[in-house]
Amino acid sequence: MLSAAVGSYKVFVPGQAVIFGDMAKSLIETLSAAFVYGFKIASPFVIMMIILYSAMGVMSRLMPQLNILFVMMPFQVYAGMSLLMVCLSMMMMWFLRYFEQQIARFAM
């Protein structure tokens, strides 16, 4: 931890102006990469919800007397938890790979 604090003085030299152009570029690249990885992590759930809500829309048109939202709510929770169990290891590997890349950028 102390070596990281000492190393930060090599990156940001005291008494010199911080180059904001490079910081802004680095911040934009980091945030855009974080958005892409966040969307990759959430994509199975987005796809599942699009399919589920589309099926609910078709079912509500076929059976207007039945309250589909009330009937499908337990299935929605079950499907979300099942998908989380299946995809959690993949999501964690994506997150850890992204985290490792970002730490490596700043550790050099």
Image (cartoon, grey):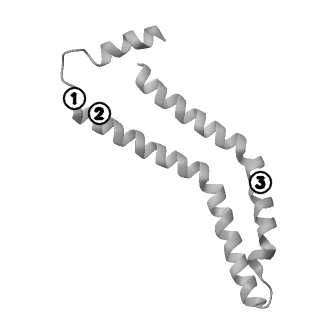
* Left or right: 43 in relation to 85: left
* Left or right: 21 in relation to 30: left
Residue at 77% of width from left, 61% of height from top?
77
- Could you tell me residue 59's position as x and y percent? 75, 83
Task: Report, in whole angstroms, how far the alpha carbon at label 1 lies from the one at label 2.
Answer: 7 Å
Q: Is residue 53 above or below residue 13?
A: below
Crowdedness near tag 2: few (<14), some (14–19) or many (≥20) residues, C-alpha within 10 Å: few
Q: Which residue is mark 2?
A: 23
- Could you tell me residue 91's position as x and y percent? 65, 43
Three-letter amino acid code of the residue under disc 2: Met
Q: Quadrant of residue 53?
A: bottom right
- Could you tell me residue 74's position as x and y percent? 81, 66
Task: State yes or no: discs 1 and 3 in contact (Cβ < 8 Å).
Answer: no
Task: Name the element at disc 3.
Answer: helix
Residue at 64% of width from left, 63% of height from top?
47
Q: Is residue 6 above or below residue 39?
A: above
Three-letter amino acid code of the residue under disc 1: Ile
Q: Earlier in the sequence, mark 3 or mark 2?
A: 2
Task: Report, in whole angstroms, how far the alpha carbon at label 1 lies from the one at label 3.
Answer: 46 Å
Q: Quadrant of residue 8?
A: top left
Q: Which residue is mark 1?
A: 19
Q: Is residue 2 above or below residue 58?
A: above
Task: State yes or no: discs 1 and 2 in contact (Cβ < 8 Å).
Answer: yes
Task: Name the element at disc 2.
Answer: helix
* Left or right: 23 in relation to 106: left
Q: Is residue 42 above or below residue 1?
A: below
Task: Name the element at disc 1.
Answer: loop
Residue at 32% of width from left, 13% of height from top?
9
Q: Which residue is mark 3?
A: 81
